[in-house]
Image (cartoon, grey):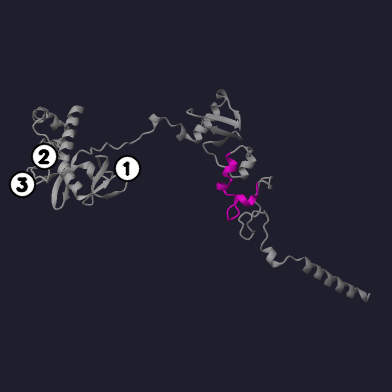
Amino acid sequence: MKQTPILLLFLTIGFGILYWLLKPPSTQLSLIDTDYDGVIDANDKEKNTDWLSDTSNYKLKDYVDVDGLIDRSKTKNLCDCWEFPDISDRKILKCEENLNWFTYEGKLIEYRMEGLELGRFYSDYGRLIATRSDNDIEKKHESLFPEHYANEEDVIINKPPVENLNKLVTISYKDKKYQLKKGFTTEKGFSFNNANYRFKGNNWEIQINPPHGAWTNSKEKDIKFLMMKFATEIKESEKIINEKDKEKTVNKRENPPAEGISVEDLYWIDLDKLNDYDLIKKEAEISNSGNKKIPTSHAGIAARKSVKMRIKLR
C-alpha cells in the first residue's frame, strides 16, 4: 500500500515525459499545410481544398493562388481540353463555360471553328456530332453566346460621314490668313509627291515614309512651294464669299512671285487650286492657252501636269 503513491508518482512523471517528447515543436505547428497546396493553414482560406485524384501529375500547389484557393486562370488549360470531361472534375477545377467549351445536359461539348464554316460540335476529341443530332446543342450554345450568331444585318454599325479633305479652311501663318485644303490640317496630313504634309501648331511638317515615317519640320523651300501651290492669302479688303451663298473669294497675290516662278507658272498653279467644277468650265480656255503658257519651273510643270490629268479623269 505504501508503494502505491510512489508508483502513481512515477507513472505521472513518465506520462509527462512521454507527452513532452511527442509534443510537436511550436515552429512545426506554424508550418502545417493540411491540404498540401503550398499555403500554410495560418494563411490558407480553404484548408481542405478538394482536388483531383491524380496528385502525381497535377499537384494542387500548381493551381492555387496566394490564399490557397483554386485559381481559374491556372486551371483553364485543364478545363479547355478533353482530359477532364467529367462534371465532377470540372466543378473541382472551377471551369467556366466559353465559346469553345461548354456543357449540355451534364456532358462536355467542344465547339470547333472549321475553315469558313460556322462551326461543328464534338462530344469527344475526335467524335463529331452529326448535324441532324446537334440542333438542341446548337440552341443551347446560341443562348450562351448570342453575339457569335449575330447576323451582319442585325449589327448596326454607325459609320462616321466621310470627311471632305479638299474643303477649304482658313489658317493663320506668320500673321497672315490663308485658305488651305482641310487635309493639310488633319493629323494624317495630305499626300503630295510621295510624302505627307500637314500644318500643325503653326508649323509645316513632312512625313517622308508615310504612313510609318516620323514627322519632321519642313524645309523653308518646301514651305514656300506648298504655300504657293496650295494656299491662297486672304486680304481684309477682299470680299469673302462661301460656297453656301454661291459666292466666291476673290484672291489676289500680295507679294510678287517667288524666284524662278514665271507668269506662265502662276497660270497653271492658280488653275490647279480650282475645284473640279470650276476647272472643267475653263477647259476650253486651257485648251487654247496650253501651248502658249508653257511653264518652266518644277512647280509650274507639276501644276500643269496635275490640271491636265484632272480634266482627263472627269
Left or right of residue 43, residue 211 in this image: left
From this view, report whether residue 69 is shown above or below residue 273.
below
Reading the image, the residue beneath label 1 is 211
Q: Nearer the viewer, residue 216 or 161?
A: 216
C-alpha gap between disc 2 and disc 3: 22 Å
Reading the image, the residue beneath label 3 is 237
Left or right of residue 288, residue 129 in this image: right
When asked about the image quadrant of residue 303, the answer is: top left
Q: Is residue 314 something that shows in the picture?
A: no
From this view, report whether residue 287 is shown above or below residue 42.
above
Q: Is residue 154 something that shows in the picture?
A: yes
Q: Is residue 235 magenta?
A: no
Reading the image, the residue beneath label 2 is 266
> What SS does tag 1 mark?
loop
> What's drawn in magenta, residue-wise?
58-80
In front: mark 1 or mark 3? 1
Q: Nearer the viewer, residue 190 or 53?
A: 190
Extreme residue toward the top, this view: 132
Q: Are marks 2 and 3 in contact (CB under 8 Å)?
A: no
Q: Name the kind of residue labelled 1 in the image.
A: Pro
Left or right of residue 250, residue 96 in this image: right
